[in-house]
Amino acid sequence: MKPRHLLCWGGYALKTHFDESEHWHGWWPWLCQVEPAALVCEVSEWEFVINTPCENAQKMYIGNAMGGNYAAVFAQLIINGSSQGPHCFIVPIRDENGGLYPGVTAIDMMHKEGLHGVDNGILIFNKVRVPRENLLDKFGSVAPDGQYHSPIKNKSARFNAMLAALTPSRLAVTFQALSAMKLGLTIAIRYSHSRRQFGPKAKEEVRIIEHQTQTLRLMPHLATVLALTFTSRYAGALLDEDIFQGKELVSSRVLQALVAGLKAYSTWENVGCLQDCRESTGGMGYMMENRISDLKCDADVFVTFEGDNVVMLQSVLHDAYDVDYEHRLLMSSFCTVATLIASKCQLQMNLISPADGAFL
């Protein structure tokens, strides 16, 4: 990577986008596999050749696809017929006048539920050649003689190390979800303090926030967003400290797990919160001019932004298991079964807590 590229990006002289999701592969499990349908990159003399072998390997849902100059493209690196796993390449897409380079095809994906200010599209590469220096080689490089070298031998571990760079963007999605929740709650709670409905007979109607159902619908979301705000700020402070000290994000497994969990929980809470805000404001909440419906459309994508939420929680559970139960396999399984049995007894016998069943 030439320094001039970094200088241009730092000064916002170039428009870029991140290309990882594929038509058939999705973005996490399948990209790690050596599939005939995956986007491939082969070594040719002093160049890499980026090629889309079939429709299933087309890059999809690419933000800024219709206007970006450069793309960070993930592709299977093929050397002498052998795949070295996914690697990231900087690929020129358009010239300074906005024209597509030969071999590059961009297709607009048109209308979406939300984020109408972002042009998502499909990118197809037909044997596009890029210089060797355009390989992001922190975790894997190709020598002039064509030999591949990497400090991480396992392909899956190497790819996971690359994905550690997504930690800051996942935290950013968390803050975006919280911002949408705060705005939706502000609108709904203010409306609830001004709208009046029903009341004691022969007396003035009361504000709807005074109705217990309205309070119970909105206040738990307010408490949740406050708790998530403080926790996310704490995670941000940890991230800033690691970056300031020059630590590698790949070694911060606890931070990665914390951010992944926050991303999943906050974005799911965001969906439920905005739906309750919309219902709490009646027909007015359905109007786009009052913004709640608009927030719902834009924020819905957060549950799959920067990683599917289910996969995020699986990674959190994997790390938690490694830390807490690695040496206690039998005991952890026993505790899990015992907890399930106690919970079932508590529900069937209407006990306040499992301990109340000690008389049995």
Image (cartoon, grey):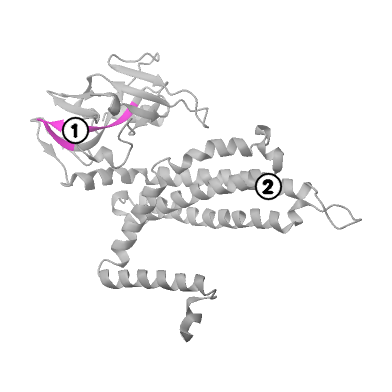
User: Counting other residues with Cα less than 10 Å from the Cα at mark 2, is it few (<14), some (14-19), or many (20 or more)?
Assistant: many
Q: Residues within 10 Å of mark 1 (few under 14, many from 20)?
A: many
The reply to whether the magenta stretch includes residue 278 is no
> Would residue 349 appear left or right of 292 to someone viewing this image?
left
Percent coordinates x, y for residue 22 in the rendering: 32, 31
Q: CA distance from mark 2 to mark 1?
A: 52 Å
Task: Return the disc, 2 or 1, that comes first in the chain's sequence.
Answer: 1
Mark 1 lies on residue: 77
In the image, what residue occupies the spot 22% across and 42% down?
A: 139
Residue 132 in the image: state x and y as whole percent.
19, 27
Whether the magenta-drawn stretch holds residue 73 is answered as yes
> Depth check: 57 or 20 in front?
57
What residue is shown at x 19% (from left), y 39% (from top)? Answer: 140
Q: Which amino acid type is marked by label 2? A: Ser
Indicate the quadrant containing the N terminus: top left, top right, bottom left or bottom right: top left
Give coordinates of residue 235: x percent, y percent: 44, 54
Q: For residue 266, which numbered disc appears in the image?
A: none
Mark 2 lies on residue: 280
Q: Which one is nearer the viewer's eye here, 211 or 240?
A: 211
Quadrant of residue 275 in the image?
A: top right
Q: Type of residue at label 1?
A: Leu
Residue at image point 37% right, 22% down: 69
* Coordinates of residue 312 in the picture (x, y in percent): 38, 49
Of badges 2 and 1, the one in the foreground is: 2
| Element under disc 1 | strand
Based on the displayed image, in which of its 4 quarters is residue 333 positioned? bottom left
Bounds of the magenta span? Answer: 71-84
Q: What element does badge 2 sit on?
A: helix
* 156 or 245, nearer to the observer: 156
The front one of 261 and 354 is 354
